[in-house]
Image (cartoon, rainbow, N blue to C red):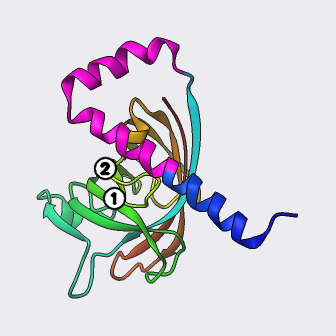
Amino acid sequence: MAKPGLTAMVVAALALVVATVATLARAEADDLVKLDAWFTRLSHAKRKTTRLHFYFHDTLSGRNPTAVRVAKSTMTEKSPTLFGVVNMIDDPLTKGPEPESPLVGRAQGFYGSVGLESTALHMNMNLVFTTPEYNGSTLSILGHNPALETFREMPVVGGTGVFRLASGVVTAKTYFLNLTTGDAVVEYKVIVLHY
């Protein structure tokens, strides 16, 4: 059985290694020669699979909204699906569903209402991570989100930093929705392949 002090040292050493690797991955993007060398080594690289789980907090109401309407069509007022509305977002991503839960990153981008007959969103956002393991790394989401369905799947079309050349899927499941304000908390699970 490992001694408690030894276990803490091993965990600290592993955290340092992960943070160093993540920093080096981002540092390569700042230097075109290093970035070119990274791509040259790519043919010998092994693809990794990473699974992430967090909660997306989309707040349209109150004094500090994280999603704001930036456009609407002339049809919006007559449309039961809010067709033509576009919201810009900088939504917190947290470890748990509570707003006070530790922050793991932010969802930055926009979504627009694209369904004439059913509620559907076009999502275009970057998940920007702030935890030590993935700090500064991003995943790009671009796809269809039938927002009132129980389970939704959207494509991961790219990434940066630790997630360079990522591809995969993100699934979304509504945890909480206020139909009056539009505020929502959505559970996200991500599976990505990257180098």
Position of residue 177 measured from the top left corner of the image (x, y, whole percent): 46, 75
Q: Return the x and y of residue 56 as percentages of the image width and height.
A: 43, 65
What's the amino acid at mark 2? Answer: Met
- Tell which residue pokes out farthest to the bottom in this image: 63
Q: Can residue 170 be seen by looking at this rendering?
A: yes
Q: Compared to 102, does 128 lie above or below?
A: above
Residue that carries the numbered disc 2 in the rendered image: 125
**Quadrant in the picture for residue 82:** bottom left
Residue 126: within the magenta? Answer: no
Residue visible at 32% across and 75% down in the picture? 59
**Mark 1 Cα-neighbour bin, 10 Å: few <14, some 14–19, many ≥20:** many
Q: x, y percentage for residue 64?
A: 22, 82
Label 1 sits on a secondary structure element that is strand
Q: Is residue 160 visible?
A: no
Label the magenta part by its dominant secondary structure.
helix
Q: Which of marks 2 and 1 is nearer the N terminus?
A: 1
User: Is residue 32 highlighted in magenta?
Assistant: yes
Q: Nearer the viewer, residue 34 or 121?
A: 34
Amino acid type at circle 1 is Ala
Left or right of 113 in this view: 48: right
To which residue does mark 1 refer?
107
Residue at (43% x, 81% y) in the render? 99
How far, Cα to Cα, is label 2 from label 1?
6 Å
Residues at badges 2 and 1 in contact (C-beta under 8 Å)? yes
Q: Tag 2, which secondary structure?
A: strand
Q: State the extent of the magenta-drawn residues as a range.
A: 17-45
